[in-house]
Amino acid sequence: MAIIDEFSHFLEAISMAYREISKGVSLAADHAKYLAWLQQDTGARQTAYKAIAKAHKDKVIHVPGFIIPFAANIASKVYLPREILKADQSSASNAVLATAVATALLNRIYPAVPGFTGGGYELTSAKKFKFAKISVKQTTAVATSKSASRITGREYQKNTTSSVTGHFGQILAGETEATALAAIIASTELAGIITAPGNSYRYVPEGG
């Protein structure tokens, strides 16, 4: 019995070794394909890229606007200029998703400084300022067949998704980014979208 057990362990070890060798050969082949991909010119890469179904950032409508950053004391009424999502997103490529994100951020972005008459507000340049932002990804079509990787040729299943990004700031004095984010993702407009299967969101903090 002991001899049989040892022989069984030996066969298992041999099988594992062959699997590792096969994996190494496969990875080496993929690496060679990756190097060949890097040597292609830009035009060839773009052609291959367009041929593969991929997630994309949707066309959305922006307008000039202002945001009160979390870093500012809201009592001082500091408004920084930044392109913001327009409330009306009916002409966006995914109007439903774009409208949901824009509406959820509506009270945290300003198309104009409220009650601005030339005094009492500080309008500061924000060329290099990085505002907080949220990107919401929605699965618009579930893949029913596999697509080939444009680099290695390996087949995989990839759903078609849409993505909409919006910047935002504070709405209440002393409000933290964590509180603001929680309110946004729990909003009537986004809660159902974010929690649906295949959907997700990504948050980048102010200054990030």
Image (tube, rainbow, N blue to C red):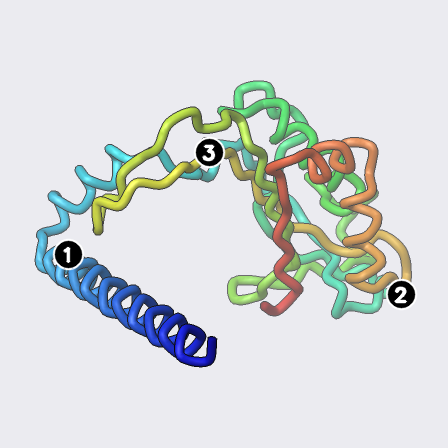
Q: Where is residue 199 in the image (x, y as percent from the top left)?
A: 62, 38
- Hey, which residue is sitting farthest top in the picture? 90
Q: Name the residue under label 3.
A: 159
Distance from Cα at disc 3 to Cα at disc 2: 40 Å
Q: In this view, does 13 lie to the left or right of 109?
A: left
Q: Name the residue under label 2.
A: 174
Query: Identity of the amino acid at label 3?
Result: Asn
Q: Where is residue 151 in the image (x, y as percent from the top left)?
A: 21, 50
Which structural element holds mark 3? loop
Distance from Cα at disc 1 to Cα at disc 2: 53 Å
Which structural element holds mark 2? loop
Observer-nearest of 129 and 17? 17
Q: Name the residue under label 1.
A: 33
Q: Where is residue 30 in the image (x, y as percent from the top left)?
A: 20, 58
Residue at the image point whose x is 36% and y is 41% from the top: 156
Of pointers 3 and 2, the one earlier in the residue sequence: 3
Bin the neighbour count of mark 1 within 10 Å (Cα to Cα): few under 14, some 14-19, many 20 and up.
some
Observer-nearest of 111 and 9? 9
Query: Identity of the amino acid at label 2?
Result: Gly
Observer-nearest of 28 and 136? 28
Q: Where is residue 91 in the image (x, y as percent from the top left)?
A: 53, 20
Q: In which quarter of the image is residue 155?
A: top left
